[in-house]
Amino acid sequence: MGHRTFLFSLLFSAAAIVPAHADKTFNRIATFPVAANLPADADAVTETSSEIIAASPDGMTLIYSDSPLGGVGFVDIADPKAPKAGNSLPLDGEPTSVAVAGTKAIAAVNTSESYTKPSGNLVVIDMASKAVEKSCDLGGQPDSVAVSNDGRFLAVAIENERDEDLNDGVIPQMPAGDLKIFTLTDGTPDCGSMKTVALTGLAAIAPEDPEPEFVAFNDAGEIAVTLQENNHIAIVSAKTGAVIEHFSAGTVSQEKIDTLDNGAIAFDQAAADLRREPDAVKWLDNDRFVVANEGDYEGGSRSFSIFSRKGEVLFDSGADLDHRAAAVGHYPDKRSDAKGVEPEGLEVATFGDTQYIFVALERASLIAVYRDTGAAPEFVQVLPSGIGPEGLVAIPGRNLLVTANETDLAEDGGARSHVMVYELGEGAAVYPTIAAVDDEAGLPLGWGALSGLAADPIEPGMLHAVSDSFYGNQPAIFAIDATQKPARITRKTVVTRDGAPAQKLDLEGIAADGKGGFWLASEGNSDKLTPHALFQVDAEGRIRKEIALPAALLAHETRFGLEGITVTGEGDEQMLVMAVQREWKDDPKGHVKLLAYKPAAKEWSAVRYPLDAGERGWVGLSEITAHNGKLYIVERDNQIGAAAKIKKLYTVSLKGFSPAALGSDLPVVGKVLVRDILADMVSANNGYAVDKVEGFAIDASGTAYFVTDNDGVDDSSGETIFVNLGPLDALN
């Protein structure tokens, strides 16, 4: 369009994850599982989703669209720290969005017979009675709905979405989408007032098939409409229905990004001329608006941008969102090729005298918070969210922010969809609990899927962790300074074989070898040709020794192998003790092995360890640490959320610890409960319990720590919970 472009540089480091102004920060105060709103007669694993969310004028009640359930759900947040189920309301169709006008909630509902015969309704719901009062025919498939700030108008983006399986999803695909505008009276739309605003002929890309995605009002009664697949934005007068301005969303060329789904995080790639293809849009004032550049067709620039209403690009965040996510272990390597962290949802709100921009990162499961300065936004913090955050609503009058997280993995035994509540208050940010510093090039180290944990034998507060097979092309050892808050990953050492990153490793355990290097335990998987093995590496991660498990053991193998390693004794009496996660074929039910290996004598032996009985799923071991004559062992189930019951720390005395030869009658050791760490996990940041407590260590001063494995943000919220449990003597 020939507009002048203003690009503000980002003058901050990706490792600067501490809020710029630490006097007030947002912290999560509650987590609500959407499944709690299922009807009493519904199957407990029925899929639910919270996608778009809104709040009542008093901020006491939330309403969200639930597409899989075919209705809307309500949450009572009169006590925001203890949300209560408000039940669900079935609707005739698939709700795609919801907004609130006074005492009424207005849902856009897709009732389409097919892609070529789209249809939908606008459904009016009384917030008090939670009953449907009225419906308006929209004449097409709706996506986003918004209410003007003065309560006079309502806008609906009629997307008439494309069939992605037809001709590879290439547009145009008829019928074309458009914009609907209604007048409101006491929060209720007048069906007869519906104006249809044609958006054809505007975009350079498929001008005959506009695909409106998101709508937002400014105080002047103007509607910003994103045409996502068309990479276009229009400004429309709510009063007249006239298109006031329209312009391309433009392109971005990105450097220092990761475009390869290759089991390694490396910001050494670039991509040119990426179409922004914005999804959500929110006004910052009457002259500026912000868009989340998700991409859904052929683009996606991984960024958020600020435009003037005339189409000038005032700011673009570049690769900053990707880098912020990587610094806190949330970079989604397996899904990062085109969209990176996938910015999708937005909220803009003023708390006190500060206007904030909240950007929902769907693939990273994070909310990035920025302060609107009128120029380049100032990064504030990141907030942990559930899986796939999409909808956000701010309630400044109560100092609250709420997110709706759409992904529900109930069918696979994973986390459910959640609504999460955050509060702005005094004090430091609770999350992240662990983050990486930048490397020498000023880029985040890139980490995730932390598994085994070990302490430096001399320096208090210094720990080391390993990443598991999720990063199979970049197995690494991470140095952690736990004296800082959040704990800081200060160094990343890639494990190498013959000068190249070692392949076929699934590192699950680490222990200092007493010679400046480490012993590493790798969990094998014969189906993937990954061996069960021990590795001794030097301080630079170079493999110096590989020790295979003996044939007598491997004859009974399963893929659930070594999950931790520790060292006892010195010199010729040095013994490695390893925890096997689950029963192998020769183990009695409910018992697993603790393996022992003496490097000097090259002798293997074992004992059996009795597992707790779980209510569902399986129970196994995930870490082992020797300290002051005892083995500290983490025992856990594989359950998440309310189903999680066993996340416990036990001890086994080394006094009388006498492993027997493999193949003989193995002795069963006794265990003593030290601490149930389930509550420590949940209270760390007011989230839900995750399944994988995989690292535990005791430092040189006797302070205990544990860390969770975030699965590399693959079917996971990406949250890593790192907890300082304090002095070991005080744990009981």
Image (cartoon, rainbow, N blue to C red):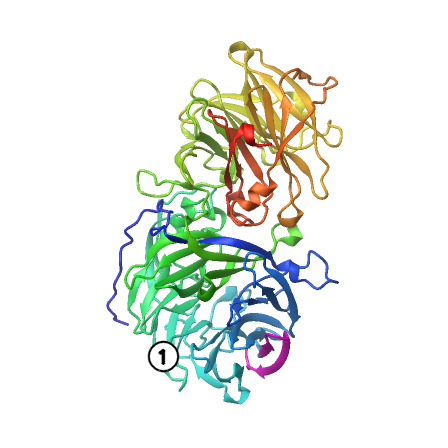
Instruction: Point out the stretch of residues depicted in magenta.
Output: 123-140
Look at the magenta stretch and give its main secondary structure: strand
Where residue 590 appears, as percent x and y from the top left, is: 73, 32
- Please tell me how many numbered marks the rendered image carries: 1
Task: Say if 412 sits above or below 42 in the image.
Answer: above
Q: Which residue occupies the extreme left position in the image?
A: 4
Using the rendered view, name the quadrant where residue 316 is placed: bottom left
Question: Which residue is denoted by mark 1 in the rendering?
Answer: 220
Quarter of the image where the N terminus is located: bottom left
Task: Say if 478 sits above or below 62 in the image.
Answer: above
Q: Residue at x 64, y 42 (%)?
A: 638
Residue in front for this viewpoint, 298 or 399: 399
- Magenta run includes residue 488: no
Q: Residue at x 28, y 62 (%)?
A: 375
- Magenta run includes residue 127: yes
Using the rendered view, name the quadrant where residue 683 is placed: top right
In this rendering, does residue 386 appear at all? Answer: no
Where residue 74 appears, as percent x and y from the top left, is: 60, 67
Quarter of the image where the C terminus is located: top right
In this rendering, does residue 233 appear at all? Answer: yes
Where residue 76 appears, as percent x and y from the top left, is: 59, 64
Q: Amino acid at mark 1?
A: Ala
Helix or strand or loop: what does disc 1 sit on? loop
Q: Residue at x 47, y 57 (%)?
A: 423
Where residue 85 appears, as percent x and y from the top left, is: 63, 62
Task: Say if 346 sits above or below 412 in the image.
Answer: below
Residue density around tag 1, few if under 14, some if 14–19, many if 20 or more, within 10 Å = some
Task: Say if 128 sits above or below 683 in the image.
Answer: below
Q: Which residue occupies the extreme bottom position in the image?
A: 192
